[in-house]
Image: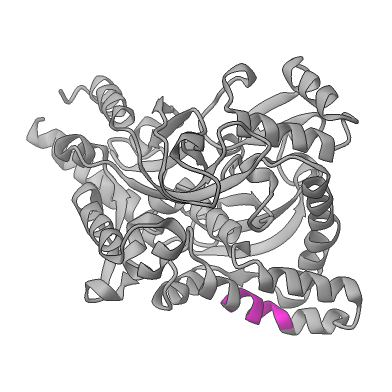
Amino acid sequence: MKHAALSRIRKANELVFERIVNADPVLFDVRRAAATIPGMRGRVILYAGPPIRWSRMSEPMKAAITGAILFERWASSTQEAQALAASGSIEFSPTHHHQAVGPMAGIISPSMYLLCVRNATHGNVAFSNLNEGLGRVLRFGALGPDVLSHLRWLNEWVGPVLKSSLVLSGPISLKPIMVEAMRRGDECHNRHLAGNKLFIDLLRPYLIKMGMKRIGVNKVLEYIEGNYYFFLNLSLAACKCTADAAKSIPYSTIVWALARNGYETGIRVSGLDDAWFTSESAVPTGRFFKGFAQEHANPDMGDSTITETVGIGAFAMAAAPEIVSYLGGRSDDVIDRSREMYDITFGEHRDFRIAQFGDRGTPTGIDILKVCETGITPIINTGIAHRDGSIGQIGAGYVNAPRACFEAALDAFERRYGVI
């Protein structure tokens, strides 16, 4: 590659990197998707990952969509909902095409409440749904009356209570919470013990002002305190509005989106605008719940890799070695995997730091040039869904993004900019 082209790439990547590290994500509202995302009125369902047709979706993705149709009361039975989904009368679209993200299946339907986050530095906004907790939940493809009942309570009680408390508290800056959480042992993708506590401690006084003796508010507080994954979706929305500010910078080779739909993994590169570059998703390996094993696992799924895109999550696992109790493996393994990510990223984050590496900044800004040169691909930590759908989560573990995505993106980059 010519020296002049490399110089332009370097300058573009410096700009993208600065946009990422200078982002200031702020939670400013909680409201229904139909009133938040343009085009969400009517029968529209958003899903995680790059674009995919209903016929090619994985079984857990189809089960989650079936559950969303029942949640919206567009159908009265599972069979009717599945037929409706296959009929072509529902519009399916990736969350990423609507400034949104969601974990695992990532399903967002019009009646669901969304966490609304604004990047105070650059002005763009991003959204994520409310976290259901662990166990039998929609995002893992679990399906049944218990899943729907919990989902309805989440959107009839938790959403409105959060919205009212935020009116009292005013906007909440999320980045300081994430920075402190990492210092306390979170990596802000699959470990949120500290982040959840810090968030609820900020919100508790305003819940008290709302009248803590009211049974509904008490139950919401108990739910958030007991669901340490609640902060996950706040982290995702924060990372999404961070990454979106870094897109469409000519000559940049830095990835601004990395997502999986249970069939394919896709990336988007800043210098290549909105284009997706996809390849077949690998199946995660890790720790399985009792009664399940590797052969039951579905290929990788979810938007939550937006965290790795901006330098946290699996890229910061060295800050959270206790995460092995959830994901499996050894503490030394997660430290080594985090360290390797410095070889494929542009720089080190100024705010997110890893004490185990001498307070070194996390590896930030996945560079397709470095991925293709080294052969190292981004490490992802993730939950694992059952491949058959309707069952839900069966474990958690690790997977690497497929190299073919990055090779395809580099080919397109070289064609576009003539820097072969």
| The stretch drawn in magenta includes residue 200 | yes
- Residue placed farthest to the top in the image? 87
Q: Is residue 122 above or below residue 79?
A: below
Q: Is residue 126 left or right of residue 44?
A: left
> Quick one: 367 or 7, which is closer to the camera?
367
Q: Is residue 115 above or below residue 42?
A: below
> Quick one: 407 or 10, which is closer to the camera?
407
Q: Is residue 348 above or below residue 145?
A: below
Q: How many marks?
A: 0
Q: Chief secondary structure of the magenta span? A: helix
Tell me, yes or no, if residue 87 can be seen here.
Answer: yes
What is the magenta range? Answer: 198-204
Residue occupying image coordinates x 39% and y 51% = 308
> Quick one: 90 or 176, which is closer to the camera?
90
Residue occupying image coordinates x 40% and y 70% = 322
Task: Report x, y in % for residue 396.
Answer: 48, 51
Q: Is residue 291 left or right of residue 326?
A: right
Q: Quadrant of residue 157?
A: bottom right
Task: Report x, y in % for residue 134.
Answer: 63, 56
Task: Report x, y in % for residue 363.
Answer: 28, 58
Q: Quadrant of residue 161?
A: bottom right
Q: Quadrant of residue 150?
A: bottom right
| The stretch drawn in magenta includes residue 83 | no
Q: Is residue 211 left or right of residue 33?
A: right
Task: Report x, y in % for residue 27.
Answer: 63, 64
Quadrant where the N terminus is found in the figure:
top left
Tell me, yes or no, if residue 102 can be seen here.
Answer: no
- Residue placed farthest to the left in the image? 3
Residue occupying image coordinates x 52% and y 67% = 192
